[in-house]
Amino acid sequence: MIVLLQFNLNNNSMKRTSCYNRLFNFFFLLIPLALNLPAQESLPTVYKLGEHETALEQEQGHYSQTLLDACNGDMQKAFELWLGFLKELEAFAKQSGCELDGSSIWLQVFFRADGSISHIGYYPKPNSRVLDDEAFKKCLESFAATYHMPLDSKQAYYNYTDVRFPLIYELYDRQ
């Protein structure tokens, strides 16, 4: 709380002080408005991790469960679904002319309850092959518009992990 004490000896001084007070008050009324502007930002479908932090924090509140939670704690099922997602992404990137081999990326993917993608956050790891950022972003945007995780859930869910391309995982039947 700011308290202003003012002692005026004559009428001119009072008028000047009043003018300054109005400017001072106007300026401090604008600060809260300016500080709230980033909170109005919406999270793009594809974004680089570290950007859009305010929008990301707001969006994360809509995703209370992980992919593992959406699979009722079944790690094998969650891993198979995630690996299927990555294989689809890799195939889509190759078909689109986006070269991923040699890249190592952190991925944060938000899925709607019906399995469609609402947001993909990414960030190349320090040991990654350099990617054409704009081409990769466009590839992810196209992929997000077409991919559908084969998992329906009552709630939206997310997964956050790192991935290296080319994929070398093979699933074996444990029976």
Image: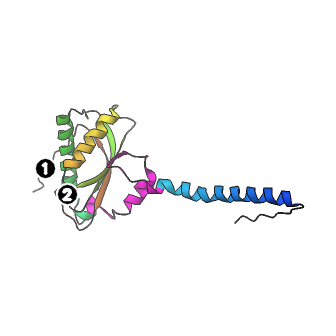
Mark number for residue 172? Answer: 1
* Quarter location, residue 7: bottom right
Identified at 84% across, 57% down, the residue is 13
Specify the segment rendered in magenta: 39-68
* Quarter location, residue 17: bottom right
Mark number for residue 8? Answer: none
Residue 70's x, y, as percent? Answer: 24, 64
Helix, strand or loop at mark 2: helix
Identified at 22% across, 57% down, the residue is 78
The three-letter code of the residue at mark 1 reads Tyr
Identified at 34% across, 35% down, the residue is 133
Residue 11's x, y, as percent? Answer: 86, 61
Q: Report the residue marked by disc 2.
A: 76
- Which quarter of the figure is the C terminus placed in? bottom left
Give the answer, above or below, for where 29 lies relative to 126: below
Compared across the picture, whether 59 is left or right of 114 comes to right
Image marks 2 and 1: residues in contact by CB distance under 8 Å: no
Q: Nearest the camera: 168 or 47? A: 47
Magenta span has 152?
no
Compared across the picture, whether 17 is left or right of 34 comes to right
Residue found at the far bottom of this picture: 154
The three-letter code of the residue at mark 2 reads Gln
